[in-house]
Image (cartoon, rainbow, N blue to C red):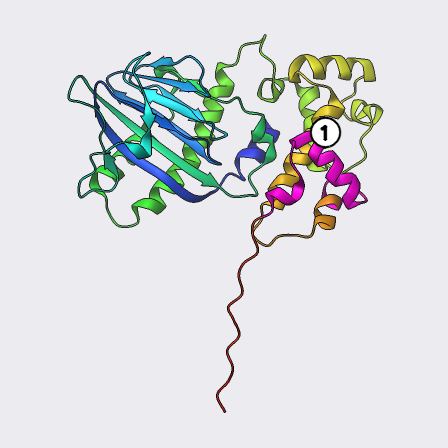
Amino acid sequence: MEVLETALEKFHVSSTLYCAFCTNRAPWGVELPQNPSVQFHALRSGTAWIGVNGGPRVELAPGDFVVIPHGDAHEVSSGPDTPTSPVHDQPAGMGTNPWIASFGKGGERSEMICAGFSFSAGSHPLLAFLPPMIHLRDEETGSLEPILQLAEREMLSSGHATSAVLGRLAEILMVESVRAYVRTLQPEQSGWLRALNDPQITAVLRAIHENPARAWTLAGLAASASMSRTSLATRFRELMGTSVHAYIARLRMLTAAALLGHPQRPKLARVAAEVGYGSEAAFSRAFVREMGVSPTKLRPPRARRAPATRASS
């Protein structure tokens, strides 16, 4: 599990986008747009349904916890077919406490903790391989419950430094929810989290993630795991759903995307070198091929410099 630990220890909240203890009355339905954040929904009482990217809605029961790791657009509602509308178009029923909100008409009551957090650009790109939605059932969320109780108490009391406390709790929730998710995976499921139960593939992943820029060969990676090239290629594809070299290419571009998003705007040549490319042109072509956009599109805007003032004489 060293690869997972390396990924999770780099997960740090940079800002809170929204966080609320919601008391809702059916019928209610909200749409949350796509944004670069990790979003959580914990149903504390009543019923709710959630759907991601326009897909079918899934029923939640009290105690269930949902993670939207990549900030995909989703909708949360009181029923499977309840109409929804953008959250910003609805009166949230917020009173003097900024951490409490309510939606709906006055029917059956439900309570939820809903939150969205931006994580630092240095967050491990390995986590980009998480699914669009992680749904943990009540019986799988025992380790999350004390954290959620603390978050709920913090929002209801709205004390000093509540935002800072919730940010720290979000980091712990992310770690615990991923660990709980790993425990739910079945033997037939593929993906890097499942692969962490295979010591040889874990050794390969560790080598790749420690030095993604290296000119890896199948033979070299197979030797590091005491496997034949054929065995490695077959088992890696079986567990990860992709080839070794396709995985390396994806990881390099995810690493580059994190570097490009840094506020200090590192030079493109430096980013290219960090992920194993000797020229900006080759890196840019690979980035567009893998990510679908030019690397320059991901760079933050330059900070505006204050206009110079003339000294009085």
Q: Is residue 147 or residue 105 the one in the foreground?
A: 105
Q: Residue at x 69, y 21 (%)?
A: 201
Magenta residues? 273-299
Q: What residue did someone put label 1 on? A: 248
Q: Residue at x 73, y 19 (%)?
A: 243
Q: Answer left or right for 39 relative to 102.
A: right
Quadrant including the N terminus: top right
Q: Answer left or right for 182 relative to 206.
A: left
Q: Is residue 188 or residue 297 the one in the foreground?
A: 297
Q: Is residue 230 or residue 262 the one in the foreground?
A: 262
| Residue 228 is a magenta residue | no
Location of residue 56 in the rendering, given as x and y in whole percent from the top left corner: 42, 12
Q: Residue at x 68, y 27 (%)?
A: 205
- Identity of the residue furthest to the top in this view: 188
Q: Main secondary structure of the magenta part?
A: helix
Location of residue 228 in the rendering, given as x and y in whole percent from the top left corner: 82, 16
Q: Residue at x 50, y 22 (%)?
A: 132
Q: Is residue 39 or residue 187 the one in the foreground?
A: 39
Q: Is residue 235 above or below residue 169?
A: above
| Residue 295 is a magenta residue | yes
